[in-house]
Amino acid sequence: MDRLQEINLKHDRLRALLERRGASALWLRRTRNLAWFTAGADASIPVDSESGMYSILVTPEKRVVYTSNIEATRLRGEELFQDLGFEYAEFPWHVGDAPSASGLITDDGEVEADLQALRWVLTEGEQERFRALGRDCADALDEAIRAVRPGDTEFELAARLDAACRRREGLAIVNLVATDERISRYRHPLPTRKRLERYAMIVVCMRRGGLIVAGTRLAYIGRAPAELHEKNRRVAAVDAAAIAATRPGRTLGEVFADIQAAYAAQGEDGQWQHHHQGGLIAYIARERVATPGDATPIVEGQAFAWNPSIVGCKSEDTLLLTRSGFEIVTAASPNFPVVEVEVGGQVIRRPGILEL
């Protein structure tokens, strides 16, 4: 599926949405929805922007890019929207313009929920890009974790991870780092000036073309204590149980119940209460975080990032659910230490602790 075919397919889906809503046009303004509809264009100038620097009006017949003169030249010269069935409505940057039409709806409120349900089932083209992003994210994590040295500040670790993502044409939209005792204290550790002594954890959500994957890696200077390896084995077992439980026809709530049971089986009952366990991922770092009783159906083509944690350890990768089962798209490099966990007759490999 090439880019134009993907955009045409998504246009068909938006025509159906307009018909269901009894609307004549949809105005897409959010960066995640613009990336989704254009098959990978980046509408963000501030990288954390919720709204794009241009917008797109979608009608049953047309797709029109509303853009200031600042963006128009680049869009014509690099995004080539004109070759992908888009028209332009250009305006001076100091004036601004917006579509006005009867029956116009925008990508917020209930309509955003409709769009999210479309976003989180990936097309063939998106799945190909997602796999490539996953491989590059795994390489970025591997590069950054192998570079840690005693005396590095957490900011220096985060800078290497950010640079590794940038070198692979991506952006670390989540970049968490903890060292030594901070790994046990905080589940969401923003980097600090603290210097590494022995133990490091790096966490990333890497975005490229709107799609996002996530992963976590651990490293220890010298030989890690046996009790730390045992903690990692326990959290890997919970992660493997979550991965094995993620099957079409089930719900997020059912997987969450299996995660709770896996914690209990590892003698860590209640640890799930201290941090979310992950869930669906696509154009947001978590399109939907799983919770007890969540009725969201699991279907082929969705992607998931589970992230179980116990005090001092965490396990996280991103998987794609396909007709043949799950693929761990951010799987660690072949020479990275792994923990093999058997679940229901299959062996699932989870990252171990890299000893440096």
Image (cartoon, grey):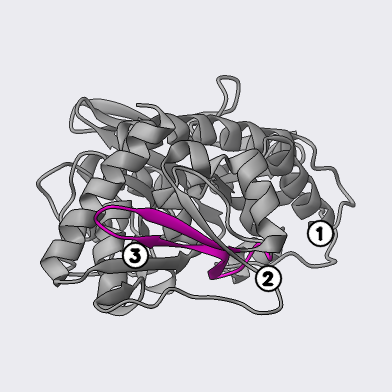
Q: Identify the image quadrant of the N terminus.
A: top left
**Labels 2 & 1 near each other (Cβ < 8 A):** no
**CA separation in Å, label 2 and label 3:** 41 Å
Picture layout, residue 69 above or below residue 158: below
Residue of label 1: 155
State which region is magenta: 46-67
Residue 214 vs residue 150, the one in the foreground: 214
Residue of label 3: 289
Q: Identify the image quadrant of the C terminus.
A: top right
**Labels 2 & 3 near each other (Cβ < 8 A):** no
Q: Amino acid at mark 2?
A: Pro
**CA separation in Å, label 1 and label 3:** 28 Å
Q: Amino acid at mark 1?
A: Phe
Residue 55 vs residue 143, the one in the foreground: 55
Residue of label 2: 92
Mark 2 or mark 3: name the one nearer the start of the chain. 2
The residue furthest top is 334
Picture layout, residue 180 above or below residue 341: below
Mark 1 or mark 3: name the one nearer the start of the chain. 1
Mark yes or no: residue 55 visible: yes
